[in-house]
């Protein structure tokens, strides 16, 4: 079997999916171990978040976009974020309202994108949506680090504030998607 850089974007997506069970295990280890598990949980999420950007970048520069990549990439992103938010909310490390807003928007936008794709209407990702994603990823990373991080970082506080900012941006960008979708539904 020969190495083909065309497959790297898909391997990064597979990696992001494989991180999910590891993140769950490490998250539960946090309760029984030292601070290293907090760092590991946050680190896993950060690395997985970076692969989200990296797989898209690699696919574009190497012209390695594939059907499986277009299908799995958004699923991997949503599974990773939803899993992390469910873990954080279930242990009261994150507020439930922004988490619900983020997860519901992701489901809504996925459905809208699928509908619009069927009628061959593309919806480009806005700069605001990219900023929302960045705020969301940093917020979740900080919340996973939580009390395990250094005191000067205020990880829990900053993570919570950023999660609320991400939720507000989520509602704004979600509205923009619905507005675009509604035009094509009527």
Image (cartoon, helix red, strand yellow):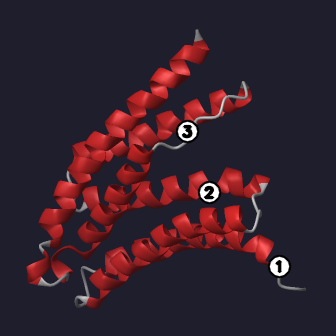
Q: What residue is pinned by disc 3?
A: 110
How crowded pointer 3 is (Cα within 10 Å; few <14, some 14-19, many 20+) is rated as some
Q: In the rendering, at what x and y percent does residue 92 appear?
A: 19, 59
How crowded pointer 1 is (Cα within 10 Å; few <14, some 14-19, many 20+) is rated as few
Give the left or right position of residue 82, taking residue 57 as reference: left
| Residue 41 visible somewhere in the drawing | yes
Query: Mark 2 and mark 3: span between their CA atoms?
Result: 12 Å
Q: Pick the quarter of the image with the N terminus.
A: bottom right
Give the left or right position of residue 94, taking residue 134 as reference: left
Mark 2 / mark 3, whichever is N-terminal: 2
Q: Pick the quarter of the image with the C terminus.
A: top right
- In front here: 58 or 73? 58
Give the left or right position of residue 138, taking residue 120 as reference: left
**2 or 1: mark nearer the eye:** 1
Q: Residue at x 14, y 84 (%)?
A: 150
Q: In the rendering, at what x and y percent does residue 126 appear?
A: 47, 42
**1 or 3: mark nearer the eye:** 1
Q: In the rendering, at what x and y percent does residue 127 appear?
A: 43, 47
Give the left or right position of residue 92, taking residue 135 as reference: left
The disc at residue 73 is 2
Query: Mark 1 and mark 3: span between their CA atoms?
Result: 30 Å
Element at label 2: helix
Q: Is residue 56 above or below residue 24?
A: above
Q: Residue at x 47, y 61 (%)?
A: 80
- Residue 103 sits in quarter: top left
Query: Mark 2 and mark 1: span between their CA atoms?
Result: 19 Å
| Residue 93 visible somewhere in the drawing | no
Q: What residue is pinned by disc 1?
A: 4
């Amino acid at each position: 079997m020969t190495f083909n850089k065309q497959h790297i974007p898909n391997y990064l997506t597979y990696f992001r999916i494989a991180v999910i069970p590891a993140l769950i295990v490490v998250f539960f280890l946090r309760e029984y171990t030292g601070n290293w598990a907090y760092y590991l949980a946050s680190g896993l999420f950060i690395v997985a978040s970076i692969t989200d950007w990296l797989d898209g970048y690699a696919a574009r520069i190497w012209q390695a976009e594939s059907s499986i990549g277009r299908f799995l990439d958004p699923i991997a992103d949503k599974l990773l974020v939803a899993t992390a938010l469910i873990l954080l909310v279930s242990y009261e490390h994150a507020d439930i309202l922004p988490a619900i807003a983020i997860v519901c928007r992701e489901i809504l936008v996925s459905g809208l994108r699928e509908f619009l794709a069927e009628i061959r209407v593309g919806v480009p990702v806005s700069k605001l949506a990219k900023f929302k994603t960045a705020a969301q990823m940093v917020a979740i990373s900080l919340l996973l680090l939580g009390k395990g991080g250094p005191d000067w970082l205020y990880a829990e506080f900053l993570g919570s504030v950023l999660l609320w900012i991400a939720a507000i941006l989520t509602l704004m960008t979600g509205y923009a998607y619905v507005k675009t979708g509604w035009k094509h539904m009527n």
